[in-house]
Image (cartoon, helix red, strand yellow):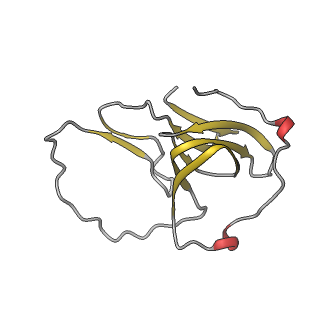
């Protein structure tokens, strides 16, 4: 599966775009109300995108949403509900991209990893998050294993 969503009670916790996704054109994977939008574009050589500037538009950001680009290695992402209950885990590999949209998440590096993170700013350090104890290693449930 090239596009995956982690959903709990109709709430999208994450959107994963696997490195194999390569549909031509423009594809957005997030609903318009997300404060962070995730899209993919594939165009042939010679395609011209008209020059443009973005208007100043006031937006309200209620929750930080993060996008991780996995450049190298393997990362396990553990997902939690808003009540901090463990839901499931997914494995990300080099070339995969994930939008962490809501609720909780934690990570375990399975192979040395390099990743790029993009999120709304300004970054508020520890004022922006609540830390809690995560799932025990013996209780990890990896769903939709990706090769």
Q: Position of residue 20 (x, y in %)?
A: 44, 30
Identify the residue shown where x is 59% and y is 50%. 101
**Number of residue marks:** 0
Identify the residue shown where x is 77% and y is 32%. 141
Q: Is 124 on the left or on the right of 135, as rendered? A: left
Q: Nearer the viewer, residue 55 or 93?
A: 93
Q: Position of residue 123 (x, y in %)?
A: 57, 71
Q: Position of residue 84 (x, y in %)?
A: 80, 51
Extreme-front residue of the structure: 112
Is residue 102 shown above or below 42? below
Q: Is 5 on the left or on the right of 80, as rendered? A: left
Where residue 65 sits, quadrant-wise, is: bottom right
Identify the residue shown where x is 19% and y is 49%. 49
Is residue 107 shown above or below 60? above
Q: Position of residue 5 (x, y in %)?
A: 58, 36
* Quadrant occupied by the C terminus: top right
């Amino acid at each position: 599966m090239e596009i995956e969503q982690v959903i709990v009670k109709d709430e999208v916790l994450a959107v994963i775009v696997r490195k194999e996704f390569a549909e031509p054109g423009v594809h957005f994977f997030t609903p318009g109300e997300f404060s962070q939008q995730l899209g993919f574009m594939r165009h042939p050589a010679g395609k011209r995108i008209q020059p443009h500037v973005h208007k100043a538009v006031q937006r309200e950001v209620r929750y930080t949403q993060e996008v991780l680009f996995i450049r190298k290695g393997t990362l396990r992402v553990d997902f939690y509900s808003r009540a901090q209950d463990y839901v499931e885990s997914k494995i990300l590999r080099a070339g995969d991209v994930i939008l962490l949209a809501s609720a909780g998440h934690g990570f375990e590096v399975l192979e040395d990893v390099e990743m790029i993170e993009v999120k709304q700013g300004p970054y508020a350090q520890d004022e922006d998050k609540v830390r809690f104890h995560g799932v025990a290693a013996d209780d990890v449930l990896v769903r939709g294993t990706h090769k």
